[in-house]
Image (cartoon, helix red, strand yellow):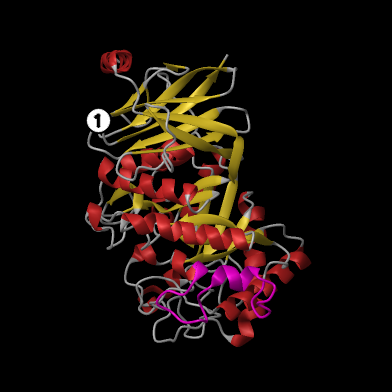
Amino acid sequence: MRYKVLLLALVAITTSCSPQADINYRIVAEQPLQVMEHFGASDAWSMHIIGQWPQERQNQVADWLFSTENDANGKPKGIGLSLWRFNVGAGSTEQGEASQIGSLWMRTECFLKPDGSYDWDKQPGQRNFLRLAKERGVSKFLAFLNSPPVYYTQNGLATNTGRDGTLNLKEEHYEDFARFLANMIKGVEKKDGIKFDYLSPFNEPDGHWNWIGPKQEGTPATKKEIARAVRLISKEFVKEGIDTEIAICEASDYRCMFATHMTNHERGYEIQSFFCPDSVDTYLGNTPKVLPLISGHSYWTTTPLNMLRDYRRQLRDTLDKYKVGFWQTETCIMGNDEEIGGGHGFDHTMKTALYVARIIHHDIVYAGARSWQWWRAIGGDYKDGLIREYANPDLRDGKVKDSKLMWVLGNYSRFIRPGAVRMSIQTTDKNGQVIPEGDTDQKGLMCTAYRNTNGQWVIVVINYAEQEQNFTFNVDDSKVKSWQGYRTSDIAGEDLLPIHKLKKGQLAVIPARSVITFISVQK
């Protein structure tokens, strides 16, 4: 407590003694942009194990990921994710070593049994986290698949081992696959009281690697195969009265969405193919239950910095042309992210956190993302988890540790609630001159603004620079009395730490290499 009081005092002194603002942000309330639907992460490759650890450990993880409560000092207990992704297993766990997937973490159970019946007690750890998420207020759930059930696949596996680039699904099982998905949705709701709002039946079907190799569950698919399967799933949902909406198609690379990238015509130009009526064989725009949006992954498009911006501009141009919405549904750190040393080696610090914050900012500002979802909630010694697990050798228990990455995602997810509208920002310098694209200095300040459905204003400011920055921000709203800030930095304990309130128009100072979210305090 003494540390906190001293910190707040220092912030107050710094704020009052700072010079004139170098940058001024004004929220342009009369220029609303996209509606933000949710922020999320997935249970993949971890929750089937960690979801069976002692309840105390499960509760800690669930609080970090889902809680929207504050402690006695007003500090958030968690990052308040508003969407949770459930990995529907294909049955590699039941196959054991015969699955050719070496890691127990990457195998998954399947509700479907070889005789065609169902076992709703399967995937218990993951189902536990569905319940924990719901108990903490998560309102949206998405079920996604990497592979059809092994009983339906062409090679009898959940991987694409030994195959070409087509969908690993036998011709005679397309309708069975659609029926399985309908039964899965109904079964989980009946068993656990969890309704899946969304279904994503394909994951990275356009990957230029064509899912060769047994590392994990997965399958490629051509656009025609996707369209055929989605039409059958839609038909089955209509028949069974299921109102779950279908999201397509979890593209592996933004460039596959508006062009072709390291693949052929059977996989590229996905926006045009699925949402232009002229694409007769693959058009899904009028298919019942199919969302009028396309989902994609941020991988491989984050460097160099000019491409971080330009790829998203190209994506946005194509989305706008065909009037299609966009969700960013998966990313983590990959080998090309050389600025932070690539994906190997978990990083608890702001180094990775700020790098990801910059990606979030660009996906929202330039691609117009309405939802932003991280890959997996818990990971091992790789930069793919929000939380790091340290499992015991028998996998029955272990330790978990949070990261600055998790808390920086919370600078968005905890405060930008479902239904919030992103607002335009006008940026001016100290002389009052408008700075084009002044909300995005890729190596300095990056700023976005939102208004929640309850009227509360939210501003997220990233300082990527090695020096502290000062600025002012304002909005034409007479009800705003002051602004409460929450800061995340490399200082111990600064994980959405409440800082000194700012009066309207007061100079703000953001330390080097930190992220602050300001929320309006109403009169």
Residue 421 position by quadrant = top right
Q: How many marks?
A: 1
Q: Residues within 10 Å of mark 1 (few under 14, many from 20)?
A: few
Estimate the x, y position of residue 171 in percent, counting from the top left.
60, 86
Q: Residue at x 76, y 65 (%)?
A: 238
Q: Is residue 339 left or right of residue 433?
A: left
Q: Secondary structure at mark 1?
A: loop
**What's the amino acid at mark 1?**
Ile
Estimate the x, y position of residue 312 in percent, counting from the top left.
46, 57
Q: Residue at x 73, y 65 (%)?
A: 288
Q: Residue at x 45, y 72 (%)?
A: 218
Estimate the x, y position of residue 348 in percent, counting from the top left.
26, 43
Estimate the x, y position of residue 344 in percent, counting from the top left.
24, 58
Q: Main secondary structure of the magenta part?
A: loop
Q: Quadrant of the N terminus?
A: top left
122 lies above or below 177: above
Q: Quadrant of the C terminus?
A: top right
Front position in the image: 122 or 338: 338
Is there any visible trace of residue 400 in the rendered image? Answer: no
| Residue 263 shown in magenta | yes
Is there any visible trace of residue 333 in the rendered image? Answer: yes
Q: Which span of residues is magenta-colored?
A: 257-283
Q: Residue at x 32, y 67 (%)?
A: 103
| Residue 278 shown in magenta | yes
Which residue is labeled 1 in the image? Answer: 491
89 lies above or below 354: below
442 lies above or below 343: above
Residue 310 position by quadrant = bottom left
